[in-house]
Every structure is written in structure tokens, then in C-alpha cells.
Amino acid sequence: MNHSVRSKREYFLQQLGFIDENIKELTNLYLSSTPVQERMKHFFNLYALEVEELLKRNHKKSIITVFPKVFIGTKVTIKYDDDDETEDYVICFPDASDPDQGLISFLSPVGRQLLLKEKGEKIALKIPSGEIAVSIYEISFVGDLFEMEKKTREA
């Protein structure tokens, strides 16, 4: 089996394990960072179900090449509808967040709005100055970058 395929599968399986093991802390972070009117009752259950569905759909394939939705560990390119400019965001866990580098937590206001959106979907992205019409232009896996960074820190 190709190592990158393996790491993609393992990356998402590890995500599920991490969420399960840290559900209380993650839930507290979610509740403290999400306005009451935007909270989803089963946020982490919904996310886990989507990851499981991604793995199930791709269990017989030799490689996961298509990411129809934004997941933690993916880079999402959004396209601003009014000027056709694009911007990339890598959706990550809070401890890897570095907004200046385009790494945004899935619990951040923008990350939360992008998580689980589908390629081609149009959304009104809420930002401090109002709303901006954007489309999900492209989604690709970059979770292996976090693995390389983790190995570099451990060395």
C-alpha cells in the first residue's frame, strides 16, 4: 500500500481517536468559541459521521483522491464571488493554528463555517465587518504536513 494512502487513512482514524479521547476539552472549546445561535447540538458526532463516511466510501480504493467536503487536515480554497480572487485556508486543530500562515482552527469563526462544506458550495462567510459571498473552489488533503511538522518537533 502506498505510504501516502496509508497516512491519509491513518490521519483520519487518528482524528477520530483524538476527538473521542479529548471530547470534553474540545466540547468546552467549541462552546466557549461559538456564539449560542451558531452552536450545533451534535457538532462532534456529525463531524465523526462525515469522516467515517469518507473512509467507508474509499475503503476499497487504493487512494483517497477526492475530498468532497472540508475536513480537518484539508486545504480549502475559497473564491470571492465579487472579484474572483481566491484565498487558501488549512483547517487544523486549535494547537496547530497559525492564522498568519493560513492555518486556522476548525473552531475559529471562519474554520467553523468552512468545515464540512462541499466543493462548489456558495456561502455567506460571516466576518467581523459583515458577510462576504464566497464559493468553495477546491479542497485537497494536507494533513501529512502536520505529521511531518510533528516528527520534526520530536526529533
Image (cartoon, rainbow, N blue to C red):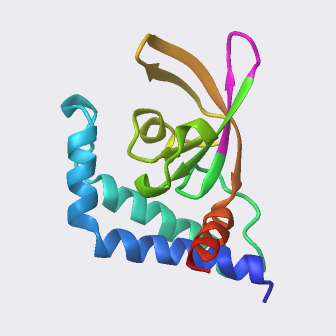
Q: Residue 117 sits in which quadrant?
A: top right
Q: Where is 2 relative to 34, above or below?
A: below
Q: Quadrant of the N terminus?
A: bottom right
Q: Is residue 120 magenta?
A: no
Residue 115 appears left or right of 128: right
How many numbered markers are drawn?
0
Q: Where is 12 relative to 43, above or below?
A: below
Q: Residue 126 sits in which quadrant?
A: top left
Between 129 and 140, the residue placed more toward the observer is 129
The answer to whether residue 105 is visible is: yes
What percent of the width, then of the height, locates residue 120?
67, 35
Q: Where is 54 relative to 97, above or below?
A: below
Q: Residue furthest front?
A: 155
What percent of the width, then of the height, locates residue 150?
58, 71
Residue 44 appears left or right of 64: left
Question: Which residue: 76% across, 63% down?
Answer: 65
Between 39 and 14, the residue placed more toward the observer is 14
Q: Residue furthest bottom?
A: 1
Q: Residue 136 sits in which quadrant?
A: top right
Question: Which residue: 73% across, 58% down?
Answer: 66
Between 154 and 106, the residue placed more toward the observer is 154
Question: Which residue: 65% across, 43% down?
Answer: 76
Q: Quadrant of the C terminus?
A: bottom right
Q: Is residue 80 magenta?
A: yes
Q: Where is 93 relative to 11, above or below?
A: above
The answer to whether residue 61 is visible is: no
What percent of the width, then of the height, locates residue 103?
57, 45
Q: Which residues are magenta?
A: 76-85
